[in-house]
Structures are given as C-alpha cells and as structure tokens.
Amino acid sequence: MSSKLLLVLLCCVCVSMGAPVTWTELSTTSTPPPARWNAGLAIVNGVGYLFGGEGTPASGLLEDMWMFTVTGSTVVWTDMSGSGPSARYGFVNGVVDGYWIISHGCNNEMCFSDAWAFNTATNTWSLLVNSTTQTAPRGRFTSAGGVYPGGRDLWLSMGQNIASVSRKFSDTWVLRVNTSGAQLTAEWEEVSSGGGLDQYNPFLPHARSLHAGAPLSPDTFAIVGGCAAGGQVGGPCPMEDSWTISLSERVWREYPHCPSGRTRAVLTPVPGFEGNGYLLGGSESWGPGVFSPQLTPKEVNASEVVLMTTNATTFNWLRLKSDGGNFPENLDSPSVAVDATSGVVYYFGGRRLEDGAFQHRMWTLGGDGLDQPDLGCSQPQYTYVHLHGTLMYLAWGLFFPLGVLLARYYRWTWPCWFVFHVIMQCLGVLVTVAGFVVIFLVGSYNEPAFPHAIVGIVLTTLMIQQFLSGIFHPCVDKEDGKTPPKEKSTYRKCWELYHAISGFLTVAIGLGQVTLGVFLIKAPLTVWAVWVGMGSAWLIAFVVHECVYVCCKIAHRGQKIY
C-alpha cells in the first residue's frame, strides 16, 4: 500500500515540475521562403502558413504565401502564392476556427485598414472587412495584436501610419469574427479610444509603435516596450513599461519594469498556461549602425527568454536562460506563432542585429520555464531622453528660479546679488542649450510636432531673448559719474518692468514644461517625489519672500522698488 502511495506522489511531483525552455532549429529539405521580417505566421491544425513581410533590398515588399509542415526537426515548405492581400508588412494576424485572419499593415506608400481571411480548408483568400464601407481603425503598421488560441477576437493595439506627417496611435481595438453563419463576417469594436494627450496621462500607456503585444488569455491583452518617440507624440525609445487591458473591464493596468526596454520584440502566449507569455527578440536601438538612444547600451541577450506571468491579482517577470547552447541570434521583428495542439512556439525570420541581414531560419521553442532559475531584472535604462530631462531639471528647477529669487528679493540687502544672478542665469542658459542639443541626438524620430516639443521651442526662444535683453540692458546714467540719479529714465523703467515680467513668465513656463516632461517619460515615483519636493520648496520660498517683501514695502512707503 505504501509503495503505491509513493508512486502516486512521485507522479504528481513529475507532473508539477516545469520543463526548461529549449530552442530547436529546424532543417529543411525544400526551398525555403525568401528571408524577411515583419511577416505573418500561423499554425492551423498542425499546418503552418507564412505571408508577406519585407525582404532584402533585392526582394523588397513581399506578397507571397507559403505553407509548411514539420516532421521531427525538419520543415518542408510549399509555395502557395496566388491572389490575396497586396504586399504589406507590419500587420496583425491570428487564427479563428480554421481561418487565418490578417489586418492592417503598410507598403512603402500607404497603410491599409482592411482585413482578410484565409480559409485553410479551401486554401483561398477573401476580403473580410472593407474599410470603405465598414468602420475600421485607421491604417497603420508595427501594431501589436493577435488571437488567443481558441479565441475569436483579433486584437489591434496602437501602431503608426505612413503619411507626409506620420502619426502614432494610442487606441486599441478587437475584430469580432463570426464563423457560425453561412458567410464569414467580422466587425471592429473599440476597446480603448486613447487620445491626443495620452502621452501625459500616467494611468494610460503612451501612443507607440514597434512594441510587443499578444492576448495572454481570452480576456486579457498585454503590451511591452516599443517606441514612443516621433509620430506627433513623444517619450522614451525604447520604452521599458508593460501593460495589460481587460476586454471585459476595459481598464489598463501597468506592471513593474523588469526586462530591458526594447523595440521590435515579439510576445506570444505560453500554450497551456493562461495568463503567461514569452517575450522574445528585439533590440534597444533602431538597427545596425544606427545611433543608440542609450547612454549605457546593453543589447538584448540572444539566449534570454523572458516569461511574463499574470492573473487577476498578481504579475511577475522571469528572465530565463534557454537550455542548451543552440538558440537564435539577436533578431528584430521575427514572426511567431503558437501551435495550440502541440504547445510548440514557432519562430521565423527577422533581421539580425549584428549586421542587418534578413533571416529565413525556422526555430521552435518548447518548455514552460516555470522551474528555471530567474536571472533577475535588468538595470533601469538611462537614455539620451533621460539625460535631456536631467539637464532641464537642473536648469528650470534650480538655476533659473534661484536667479529670479536673488534679483527679486535680495537686490537691496545683498551687494553680491547681481553677480550671483548673472551666474545662475548663465548656468541655466548653458544647461538648457545642452539639453536642447541632446534631445536632437536621438534622430529624426523626435520631430517637433507634439505639445512638449512645441512648448520647448517656444520656451528656448523666450530664454534666449531674456538672456539677450539682460546683456544689452540700458545702463543707469550717473549725473556726476559716480552716483546714480534720483530718477531713472523712462526707457530704463520700461526695460526693468519688461525684464521682470518676461523673466517670471519664462520661468513659470519652464516649470510647467519640466512637469510635462516628467509625465512624458513616465518617470518612476522617486523622480516624481524629487520634482514635487523641488516645486513645493520653490513655491513656499517665493510666497514667504513675497510676503516679507510686501511688508517691507508697506513699512517703507517712501522707497521706490523700480
């Protein structure tokens, strides 16, 4: 009896133990598809499909269709190209009841807002959503999306369009697919509208593109990282934040940072573990030889698999090292699909970070990693955007307010006030110019087309004119060459009034601008605490000094302030 009980216990232990995550490269006995990235990949009843994407300069945009089957560690490819969606890349896709649904994406000239369905039983494409006659999200690419295995909703979250002035989006939608009728139908439904000022709302994810995202349960969709710079918005690129939204509650929840910020990564649900996802690939820069936005670069480790675990009450990150020495190289924008039947994750193509070469290798990822040791969270990133913020923090949170305080309240009591006023203002100008230059080092993604950037240009212009007006101020004429006159000239009085009002206005705008910036970078609590503390300290200091100043002015009615 005891031996049977021991056997049962051992079986339970074996079942509860997780399997380490392991990569396997598949060989092929047929001609593989051309190398590409930003393509679509799907597994339907054990058969795989590949469509579209962007290939090498020689291949260009692709509109080919491929089917593949896997036996052991061998993949066999079959070209099925024919009539169907036009060439595109960066679209979202997923499987619903034997239909492979793809939607949106762009070519080099325009973005699409249509949706197509591939019937795997008849191997034919059909137009599922005609955006000219049906409501659909605006055309875009590099969005996050997908269908949870066994689900019926295709998610589409955020992304960017192609236009003379491109735009990034903060909205999230689901395509409700109905396969029960005589004809396949679908209808878009907005889950989260977003808005033009969402980049300043700390309770919502910023508009972005190049982010990873996938449904991790029938009700929950997750996004990780991406790029918030450019596209008429602003923010870090790459981003380190991660969010989930519930389809039933329609509320975004932010989770602690752990993996390094990255763009062009992929997120896929872990088969058989609802609420879990694998974060794979991606990079911290925009491509080989492109300026890195990081001051302390640390590329994504190729052997690293990040496990994201969520449920209604908890959230956790696990950074895992894949078992064995064989794993894909660091890749941008690979394609990923889950076989819900076998529990295998397929991983295809992408662009190699080392040299920008496009790939057409196929890998599988198995295991759940639940019992593997955690590598721990990455250190917080410090980018040029953060350096820009630090410099502006010093200029508008310290140097300029201190200079104004000295000029306003200490000019009659401290002989050295003017020297220190000039020093503070010069330091503020130098640090602001440095911060202004730094933000443009991150490239053309930071076009001045959103509120923080526009206000920044206006503020810099005000600062320069204020600084020049101080340098070329009218001197007080001295009657005997030694003592100033009893009455200042009208010109001098007007200049002093103008310089004072302009100075206060510029500093006030600067304080508000830094506050917008803190919202924009989604600063951690410590940064907020420091900024709120500094702002409160300056407010108290100016109120106290102004009260003393007014009292002194009343007590000495005969003295003129200007």
Image: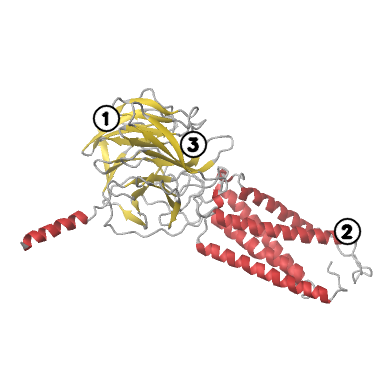
- Dot 3 falls on a residue whose secondary structure is loop
Type of amino acid under label 2: Tyr
Q: Disc 3 vs disc 2: which is toward the camera? A: 3
Instruction: Judge the density around disc 2: few (<14), some (14-19), many (≥20) Cα neighbours within 10 Å.
Output: few
Question: In the rendered image, which residue does mark 3 sit on?
Answer: 137
Looking at the image, is 189 positioned above or below residue 277? Answer: above
- Amino acid under label 3? Pro
Q: Locate residue 151, reporting x and y percent.
A: 33, 40
Quarter of the figure that contains the N terminus:
bottom left
* Mark number, residue 491: 2
Q: Is residue 118 above or below residue 507?
A: above
Q: Nearer the viewer, residue 509 or 95?
A: 95
First reached walking from the N terminus: tag 3 or tag 2: 3
Q: Is residue 266 visible?
A: no
Looking at the image, do the residues carrying marks 3 and 2 touch, with CB atoms under 8 Å apart?
Answer: no
Q: Between 557 and 247, which is closer to the camera in this rendering?
A: 247
Q: Indicate the quadrant where residue 27 lies.
A: top left
The residue type indicated by label 1 comes to Ser
Disc 1 target residue? 30
- Tell which circle, 1 or 3, labels the residue nearer the N-terminal end: 1
- Rounded to the nearest angstrom, the CA distance separating label 3 from label 2 is 59 Å
Classify mark 1: helix, strand or loop.
loop
Q: Is residue 372 left or right of residue 454?
A: left
Position of residue 107 in the picture relative to residue 393 (left or right): left
